[in-house]
Image (spheres, rainbow, N blue to C red):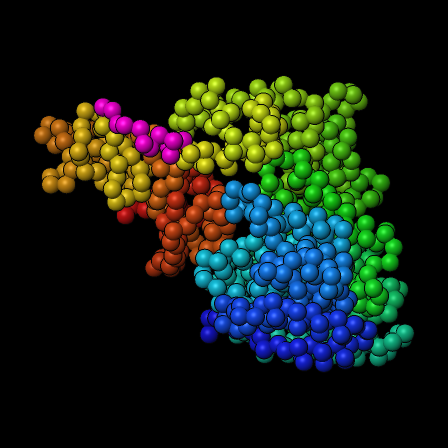
Amino acid sequence: MDATDERYDDNYTIDMLIQKILTNDRQYDLSKIVTAYKFAEKAHEGQFRSSGQPYIIHPLAVSFILLDLGMDTDTICAAMLHDVVEDTDTTLEDIKKRFGQDVAMLVDGVTKITKMPLFDKEQQQAGNVMKMLLAMSQDIRVMIIKLCDRLHNMRTLCYRPEVKQRNKAHETMNIYAPIAHRLGIESVKEELEDLSFRYLDPYAYAEIEQVLELKKDKREEFIESIKKQIADKFKTEKFQREPFISGRVKSIYGIYKKVFIQHKNIDDVFDKYAVRIIVSTTLECYNVLGIIHNMFTMIPNRFKDYIANPKENGYQSIHTTVMGHEGIPFEVQIRTWEMHETAEYGIAAHWKYKEGIQGRDKMEKYLAWIRQIIEAQQTSDDVEEIVRAIKTDLAPEEIVVMTPKGKPISLPVGSTVIDFAYKIHTEIGHKTTAAKVNGKIVPLDYKLSTSQICEIITSKDPDKGPNRAWLKIVKTNEAKSKIRMWFKRECREENIEQGKLELEREFKRYRINIPEEDRPKFLADDFKRHNCNNIEDFYASVGYGGISLAKIIPRLKDKYVKMHENEPAHSPSVITVEAGNGSSVVLDGISDYAIKFAQCCNPLPGDDIVGFITRGYGMSIHTKNCINYRSALERNNPEELARWRDDVRWSSKTASSIQTGIEVTASDRVGLVRDISEILAEARIPIVHSSSRNLKNGNALFEATIKVAGTEQLKNLFDKLRRVKDVISVDRASS
């Protein structure tokens, strides 16, 4: 059975939930939960999921997951009711009257925004995420419900169309898995990643799954052998209570990241196998560490003490990688029971034995990063900034860099010394002039690594500020927002001038001829979109980086084309391709000609083009670099050359996005398709069709039909694809 065809058992009933509650070790208001179920069941009556099951199965399943996390009565009730406001005639006021203010607040927090005047799906997504984060900053249970809601939707994603599967998986991987990580709910995070990965790169998923399955018996035998060796040794030691020992194989996506990011062979992933040891006290953790290092050979540079230096999400554990007697490396995780609760359930662990979080200090610790992201987004005029912030700033892969005084600073992988400076303090970031790493001067774009000691050298000049070029250097959105804020506050006139120049340059590149006096009307929608009151605000925002022209120009081009599509044609005649990609060309002094684009060279807007008068069809459009055109020039046959026309050019009415084919040849490896697809997704290039196959020489060929704005966008895409590991060549498809 294909991995994507797996079905989950969704036969949940209210009786099963009641039984689970009755056997739980904490008290619940069973009557309130049952009432919420009946209310939701009636509200969703006649509604069905894509699987064909009654819709009430979904809220029940989400409630089961939350119950496993140890969440409280109001959270379970909110889970039962979380879709009734969005999908039925029920109002929040109805919820409040029946179940109280807290339940109504939680339901409101997870209800999608449906009536905001947003412009596209990305904005809708960003608006919904921002709403959730704002609600989450007041009550963390909002996001815990949403994570469990998303987890069940991902478990049943096989029932959705393929396009929606990929979109949902991409959103989950970029938004919800990082949030689960930052909340410390590792069990949910790992499952979300694995489920997303199987839809984003099913070939790589299946390959890793197959490798693991083939060695299943040997894996289990190895893990059981290690557990027995450790257990036998512990019998000679004294503990407050018997240590708990478990073993597992790393998640499929976890293995993939090691293979993909660190470019390892799957057999060289050291922590593919993991043994977890849970003891009673911190002192026992370090005693066990000594025992393990005496039993097995420690692998250098594979030791991490997260007890002494906890992760930002509160995670604590000792990690060490050792070599087994069989010559197989494995990771050992050592923690206390309290640390284990936090590691598995994160912030949800605080609800396992008590109602809510006692004390604002703990709440603030968990919520600080939420507020940082919200503040960072508010310094940008791009609503989708919040999605990018979550994707980068909450990335699971982290580094820990030390200050000269020994304070650990956590940053995403790829962070520079400037990111480090801004993490310490805003003013230190602004006044950074140089940096030392392990005592040596390094450039400001130097990427830091774990365990390095970084010293920031600052200017004493009170007027010193950041450089605009830093926006292209820094990794974290926290640093970007602080840099943008400085320019927004200190350099408005300079920003206006810079933004105006950038807009005019892009208008010229995309042949958008809008007089300066008409620009306010032309950009009116973008004023609303980016919270600008006038053209000066718009220019200023472009100038300090709050608005990305690369993102909005294709839409403006499309708007410009539509504005002029009903204008009468003048000589030279404009011929629109009837059955192609929607492009237009201008033929001087010629009208009523059938036009087609040659498949030998696939011309795109921006290419220098020529026309060839065919016998019986009309005119075929080629690029001037086309091998057929160059061969004709070399032959220098006057009769043949007379059929080639160089008075052909692209019309300003050419479509803002047209189809073309690409071919990527690369050395075959796990994750290749995902790497290429990720580049296309990040560039926001729609994929009409894609396929991949192995070549006889051992290489792989990835083929795709995509939509691009022209040669400039295609060139940038090719540059990025050529930098992908193991890529040999990137070309336009010949047909």
Relative depth, front residue between 323 and 402? 402
Where residue 661 sits in the image (x, y, percent)?
34, 47
Looking at the image, residue 414 sits to the left or right of residue 431; the answer is left
Q: Residue at x 31, y 40 (%)?
A: 582
Please tell me whether residue 338 is drawn above or below residue 681 in the rendered image.
below
Relative depth, front residue between 436 and 355? 355
Q: Looking at the image, can residue 446 be seen?
A: no
Residue 83 magenta-drawn? Answer: no
Q: How many marks?
A: 0
Please tell me whether residue 444 is drawn above or below residue 327 in the rendered image.
above
Q: Residue at x 66, y 67 (%)?
A: 80
Q: Residue furthest left?
A: 639
Looking at the image, residue 245 sits to the left or right of residue 647; the answer is right
Q: Residue at x 65, y 21 (%)?
A: 492
Report the span colored magenta. 560-571
Where residue 155 sits in the image (x, y, percent)?
57, 67
Q: Splitting the image into 4 quarters, where does residue 225 fall?
A: bottom right
Q: Looking at the image, can residue 57 be seen?
A: yes
Looking at the image, residue 700 sits to the left or right of residue 678; the answer is left
